[in-house]
Amino acid sequence: MSVSKRKSGFTLIELLVVIAIIGILIGIVTVVAGKVMNQSHNAHDLSNLRLLGTATWSHATDHKGRLLSSRSEGENYHPQDIVDRFWIRSYGTDSNGDPRMVNVQGQATELLSTLTDGAAFPYIGDVRAYASPFDPTIGILEEFVADNPNLKPQRIRSYAFNALVGCKWGADDHWGFHQGSQNWPIESGCNIWTPTPHVCKYFLPTETISQIPQPGGTMVAIGEHDLWGRNLGGFTLHPTEMKWIDVPALWNDGLINMSFVDGSTGAIQFESKGLEEAWRQYQHDFFYTDAEDDYRKIRKVLLPGVIGNVLDVGY
């Protein structure tokens, strides 16, 4: 009597089933890990922004209500009381005589002293808080020091301050807004760059907390990505037209994190799919009507009570 014996091992079909199951499991783990990583980055980003918001509030507490200025340079065009409030200083030289900003492959590149010599740093104390974990342009921070021959044209800072907050006379305290013309006197805070009264009325002093109508709803810091390198000056939009003077960083799937004057944080979800392409083409000062809802969302937090309010549905 013969007895048939079955060989041990897997059949081809069984192996294919096992491989398929492993592939599915790897896919699930990859998706879950990606979501967890994104949530971690988002929490880190909000934590950085909270530090920046708290810094400007704390600065005001220590300086008779005066908020940090959104300016990053232009010391030759501003009185000392504004220069002293520049949240960062990407100009001139530090205490060692080294430049705070250098040219790297044609790109103006900020060094760490830009951050550490700014008025915000005593309240933050860590240069890593200036860099968003979402920002792909951030370099190795420790390398951004003077006389480093291996510097790359990267950034050390992801965030910009609201150009309408901490102003002595107008938006971003830009020198152009304070120059008079035959149409608009210096006292108005307007010049030929903004020659219409319906725009000029938004250029108001916001130097102190008491001059901010709604501190808890007024954005103070936001991510901004400039293709040419550093973020120059403060972040703003045109107050009455759908003109993107600046565009917030879009590297978090359209979720725009920000902090407010009172130190709280929040986020706005952008819906436009074409804004990033328009930004890559024009970068600054362009009209883009297909992102009207996103424009309104940001406009509401620029200076509510002066430029609309949280219930504003128009502009």
Image (cartoon, rainbow, N blue to C red):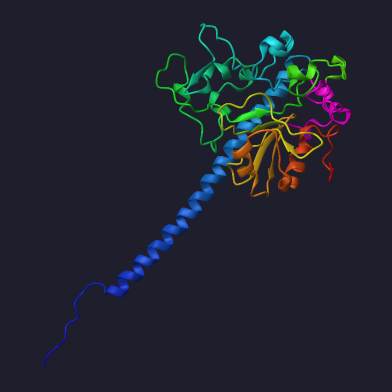
Quadrant of the frame with the C terminus = top right
Quadrant of the frame with the N terminus = bottom left
Locate residue 42, reporting x and y percent. Answer: 59, 41
Question: Residue at 87% across / 27% down in the picture?
Answer: 201
Is residue 43 shown to the viewer in this render?
yes
Report the number of discs: 0
Q: Quadrant of residue 10?
A: bottom left
Is residue 61 shown to the viewer in this render?
no
* Frontmost residue, 110 versus 285: 285
Q: Quadrant of residue 242?
A: top right
Q: Which residues are magenta?
A: 190-219
Q: Look at the image and say whether residue 206 sits in the magenta stretch.
A: yes
Task: Pick out the residue farthest to the left.
Answer: 1
In the image, residue 126 sits, relative to residue 25, either above or below, namely above
In the image, residue 255 sits, relative to residue 133, either above or below, namely below
Q: Quadrant of residue 123?
A: top right
Give the main secondary structure, helix, strand or loop, of the magenta stretch: loop
Question: Residue at 74% across / 16% down in the picture?
Answer: 175
Side of 201 where 78 appears, left or right = left
Locate residue 253, reporting x and y percent. Answer: 60, 47
Side of 32 where 238 appears, left or right = right
Task: Pick out the residue farthest to the front.
Answer: 182
Side of 1 where 169 appears, left or right = right
Q: Look at the image and say whether residue 212 sits in the magenta stretch.
A: yes
Question: Residue at 52% across / 19% down in the picture?
Answer: 112
* Frontmost residue, 28 versus 221: 221
Locate residue 223, reporting x and y percent. Answer: 63, 34
In the image, residue 14 sits, relative to residue 214, either above or below, namely below
Locate residue 132, reporting x and y percent. Answer: 56, 34
